[in-house]
Image: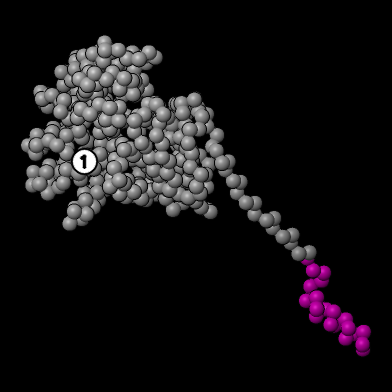
Amino acid sequence: MFRTAMNTALLGLTLLAAGSAPVASADEDEASSCLRTKVWDSYGDGWAVRTLTSTELTNGKTRSYLVSLYAENEYRIATCGDENVKNLDVLLYDTKGNIVQRDDTEDREPLLEFRPPATGTYYVVLYLREPVEGADKAGAAMAVVYR
Amino acid sequence: MFTHCLLSLLLACSGGEGPTEPAPAPAPAKEAPKANPETPEVDVEKMKKEADEIALVPSPVETQKALEGSGVDTQLATLIPKHQFDLAADNVDHAAVRTGVVLADVLLTVKTAKKGVLVKRVEAVRTGMNQLKGGKDIDLTLVDIKDRLEAEAVTRDDLLKEFDELSGAVIPELEFNGKSRVVPLIEAGSWLEGSNLVARAVKKAGKKEAAEKLLKAPTVVDYFLEYVRTDGSDKAPEAVTKKLEESLLELKTVAEKTEPLSDDDIDTVIRVTNAVLALL
């Protein structure tokens, strides 16, 4: 009962986001849906969402996001790629362009966990390192969650 | 006779069409696509200009968590004043900042506020969203939330998740009739309310060292200033916009300090944020 009500609410919000976003390709929707489920499930472990967004990436290209992070909090940068992704990478840079942390997995749902040593501004970079054969573009979603 | 037979055989083997064409050269093997480098080439200046700012501003609940981590256990929700907002003011800047403030109040109090108080706040968010032309879907969602809240058909934990998602994923993607500064101004309202409450909590707890981690956010202030300074035919009367810009500039001065924040700095944050909130 509890779960059903929650899922209904989530579905409504998902439809709302999909229906109202300026441009949401089917691929971005797939990535967002995957990530939304992950983020929603992580609430049980004390995580909460700051931002959840999606984008389209071209093979070998990046998309960067400016984020401010508090020293006292623990953060996760969670991602999901659509079925066109073979290897999606996520990297965290400081404002001088140094890599602070990066994922070393070869998959389409990389995750970073980070506890900032000081409150500050960083860049989250999504990188379509390898699409599946025959694909040049892919949808990807990124969420900043904290606890 | 034998020669004739041999000649016939040769002609039969050759198909009778003279010498054969040379076989075409085999197609060159398809080149494997070049692998992308392990680390993307990143130009910091380009990244600064092109980075998406959708994830820049922390949520009020996130700020509350950081406050607790800094040793200040005051619940921000307990410091929220009884705002006397002008809900009829519907010019974009005014409505956006006010809606952001109320949204922050909802997020901070969703688990603890009395039902009637929370319903009024949800209704105020709805009024703002309609004034900002947020669209039919967000209106229906807020009505649905309000109905479930009134009927006690939703847990407060679930409501917090729904408002987190509204605030962090749904509202930032809304078009607001093509007005790009609406989302940043809603965020500015939430952030101003959060900063006001944090500064008061830090002052009350006498832990100004916590302010270092929570009130020094010059990048966030710059982001808001950019949009406050954007011209638009439906900008709020100067009373709101000018005060907002002045306040943000003062907050920026505090946020950029390299030395530890003083009691005066914390008082400055309280004073300037109070001044903006009083205009709404």
Residue drawn at x 34%, y 17% is B255
Q: Which residues are magenta?
A: B1-21
| Circle 1 Cα neighbour tier, 10 Å, few/some/many (<14 / 14–19 / ≥20) | some
Query: Between B22 and A91, which is closer to the camera in this rendering?
Result: A91
Residue B160, percent from left and from top: 21, 41
Give the vertical position of B30 relative to B275 (above or below). Answer: below
Q: Please tell me which residue is depicted at 12% across the width and 27% down the height of the picture.
A: B87
Looking at the image, residue B90 lies above or below residue A85: above
Model colouring: one colour
The residue depicted at 48 percent of the width and 39 percent of the height is: A102
Looking at the rendered structure, the kind of residue marked 1 is Leu
In the picture, measured across the screen, residue B260 lies left or right of residue B201, that is right
Magenta portion: prevailing SS class: helix
SS category of the residue bearing label 1: helix
B9 is within the stretch colored magenta: yes
Whole-percent x, y for residue B73 in the image: 23, 29
